[in-house]
Image (spheres, rainbow, N blue to C red):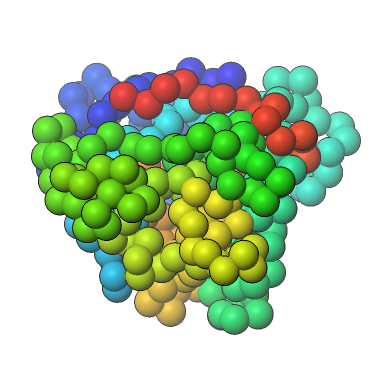
Amino acid sequence: MAAHIRRRLRKGATTTAVAAAAVAALAASQAPAATLADGSAGSGDPKAAGEDTASGETDGAATGNSPYYTDLPPLVTPDRPGSSSGLPAAGSAEAGIPASVLAAYKQAEQTVATTDPSCRLPWQLLAAIGKVESGQARGGRVDANGTTTSPILGPALNGQGFALIKDTDGGAYDSDSVHDRAVGPMQFIPSTWASWGQDANGDGRKDPNNIYDAALAAGRYLCANDRDLALAADLDKAVLSYNRSTEYLRTVRSWYSYYQRGTHEIPDGTGTLPSTPS
């Protein structure tokens, strides 16, 4: 497992020179994933990477800029796209994605390919975001319908080290009637879910705790503003609309590149868990 750096996202905060240098060094080792669309290593300012936002957002980010896992993929990556054979020992565990979670990402890709073909959404991008946001639903701890077996909640967005986002759902999704929290395997805040929530598994509910619903919602959110995710600049904008941090973009791009090189299905509940975010 590659070394990782833990950090707390603070709206408007800057990282120390030491942390920035460490992140840059680690990101560089994951090239080309760490290189932004403009060829730079990133300035830490989302606007510098041409970030835009999707309609229906709160605070300009799907997650409310909640904390995320900063673990990076192994330095040795799979070399057979889409194959489960020939994976190097150093990368085999991290390349595994729980069965229901992987199925949800691929189903979302197929659905969006039908409803919004110009977006060219790759399921590996959903997998990268799912890894960074929740460790693939905490290693695939979901039931037969794809709903997490226990809530996945971010910290209260109370303005103390995080963005200030007061309650918008009466605690219906996040059990917090004072402040909003990011919810579910793709970590949507309730106000964003109200605009982008989907019922992908056909049970009549739009549930942010369900990996099928959340994956499709994330896919459609990333495709907003007529983005074409096959274009590096649009992909960067999409990821930054999810969390307004260039370090977040580097981390997601590293996992995206890793998963493009190859993945394999593993049983639900057996996925590798990342370190606890701070």
In this view, 15 is above or below 255: above
Nearer to us in this view, 204 or 6: 204
Q: Residue at x 46, y 54 (%)?
A: 208
Q: Residue at x 18, y 38 (%)?
A: 162
108 displayed left or right of 15: right
Place residue 60 in its image quadrant. bottom left
Quadrant assignment for the C terminus: top left
Q: Where is residue 271 in the image (x, y as percent from the top left)?
A: 66, 29
In this view, 274 is above or below 142: above
Q: Is residue 65 visible?
A: no
Quadrant assignment for the N terminus: top right
Nearer to us in this view, 30 or 139: 139
53 displayed left or right of 85: left
187 displayed left or right of 116: left
In this view, 144 is above or below 238: above
Place residue 121 in its image quadrant. bottom right
Report the label total: 0
Q: Position of residue 79 (x, y in %)?
A: 76, 39
Nearer to us in this view, 248 or 159: 159
Q: Position of residue 178 (x, y in %)?
A: 16, 45
Q: Residue at x 88, y 35 (%)?
A: 85
258 displayed left or right of 228: right
Q: Where is residue 55 in the image (x, y as percent from the top left)?
A: 29, 73
Q: Which residue is drawn at 63% across and 40% down?
A: 142
In this view, 226 is above or below 217: below
Nearer to us in this view, 218 or 212: 212
Q: Can residue 130 be seen in this view?
A: yes
